[in-house]
């Protein structure tokens, strides 16, 4: 996906799948979250808001009229024409480091019947060498396993870049009680065969409980997180068109069968664990 002529280098991700940043109200929630964290940290200068896996900068570009102290940074390998910092690696952060649907794109190994699953460039699978894994023994009780240790390491590395503040990763995921194979591809808004030739997005759900255990992070649902940030689909009896539109966006973000099914990993660093609460 990020190799020479890789899918995410030549394609805008939002043209191929829908995620939080496609819903304008999500930027409102992120701004509220950042504002609470800024206050909890004592209003540092600068206060960082960093989007890891920033696509083409849609989220940060929607954060208009932020305080001058706020330093917006997108981290992505693809180029983008934006009026804020755009980096290929995660900087040192004092503030909020946000990763929306980043962990699901971290490559992982797959094992079945005690052997690595090999895949050719046309998507054909075969069995490789025998493989044992402490991670599988602990986190994936049975069946075809998508070994999430690479995601645990990536999450821990992201947390290590924050000196004071918080790291929030948002992704589709599962826990040890609901493990299931999820490796798949997406192209043009449709689910397709996972072929590793750069023709599609490749993704697999994140073992969120394993990532949480790697750093001691809190794991909550998107619905819980957004409700705590004041995002609600409940409307008063008489509303205007703008309020109806916000309600529609809130329903999409909170829908447990859609975007509301995301899990949130929340890791405070040098700040009280209650910083997200009003």
Image (tube, grey):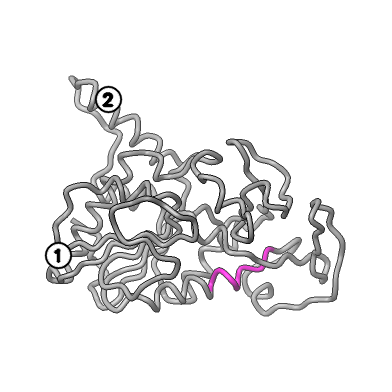
Taking the spot 42% from the left edge, 75% from the top edge, the residue there is: 216
Residue 103 forms part of the magenta stretch:
no
Would residue 136 be found to the left or right of residue 17 on screen?
right
Image position of 150 with respect to 252: above or below: below
Front-most of 227 and 116? 116
Taking the spot 85% from the left edge, 70% from the top edge, the residue there is: 128
Residue 147 forms part of the magenta stretch:
yes
**Residue marked by disc 2:** 244
Q: Residues within 10 Å of mark 1 (few under 14, many from 20)?
A: few
- The x, y position of residue 31, in whole percent, is 24, 52
Residue 278, disc: none
- The x, y position of residue 80, in whole percent, is 41, 52
Taking the spot 20% from the left edge, 61% from the top edge, the residue there is: 70
The answer to which quarter of the image holds residue 89 is bottom left
Distance between the Cα atoms at labels 1 and 2? 31 Å
Q: Residues within 10 Å of mark 2 (few under 14, many from 20)?
A: some
In this picture, which residue range is highlighted in magenta? 146-152
| Of callouts 1 and 2, the N-terminal one | 1
**Residue marked by disc 1:** 39
Q: Say which quadrant the C terminus sits in.
A: bottom left
């Amino acid at each position: 996906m990020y190799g020479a002529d890789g899918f995410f280098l030549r394609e805008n991700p939002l043209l191929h799948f829908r995620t939080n940043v496609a819903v304008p109200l999500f930027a409102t929630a992120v701004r509220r979250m950042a504002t609470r964290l800024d206050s909890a940290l004592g209003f540092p200068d600068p206060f960082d808001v960093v989007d890891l896996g920033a696509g083409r900068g849609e989220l940060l570009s929607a954060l208009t009229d932020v305080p001058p102290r706020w330093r917006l940074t997108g981290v992505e390998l693809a180029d983008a024409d934006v009026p804020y910092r755009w980096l290929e690696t995660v900087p040192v952060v004092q503030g909020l480091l946000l990763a929306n649907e980043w962990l699901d794109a971290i490559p992982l190994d797959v094992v079945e019947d005690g052997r690595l699953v090999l895949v050719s460039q046309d998507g054909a699978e075969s069995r490789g060498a025998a493989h044992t894994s402490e991670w599988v023994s602990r986190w994936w009780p049975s069946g075809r396993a998508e070994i999430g240790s690479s995601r645990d390491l990536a999450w821990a590395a992201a947390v290590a870049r924050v000196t004071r503040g918080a790291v929030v990763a948002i992704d589709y995921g599962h826990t040890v009680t609901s493990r299931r194979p999820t490796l798949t591809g997406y192209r043009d808004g449709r689910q397709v065969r996972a072929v590793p030739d750069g023709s599609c997005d490749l993704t697999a759900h994140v073992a969120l409980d394993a990532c949480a255990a790697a750093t001691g992070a809190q794991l909550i649902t998107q619905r819980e997180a957004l409700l705590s940030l004041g995002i609600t689909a409940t409307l008063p009896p008489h509303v205007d068109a703008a309020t109806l539109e916000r309600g529609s966006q809130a329903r999409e973000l909170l829908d447990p069968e859609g975007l509301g099914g995301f899990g949130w990993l929340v890791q405070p660093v040098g700040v009280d664990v209650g910083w997200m609460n009003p």
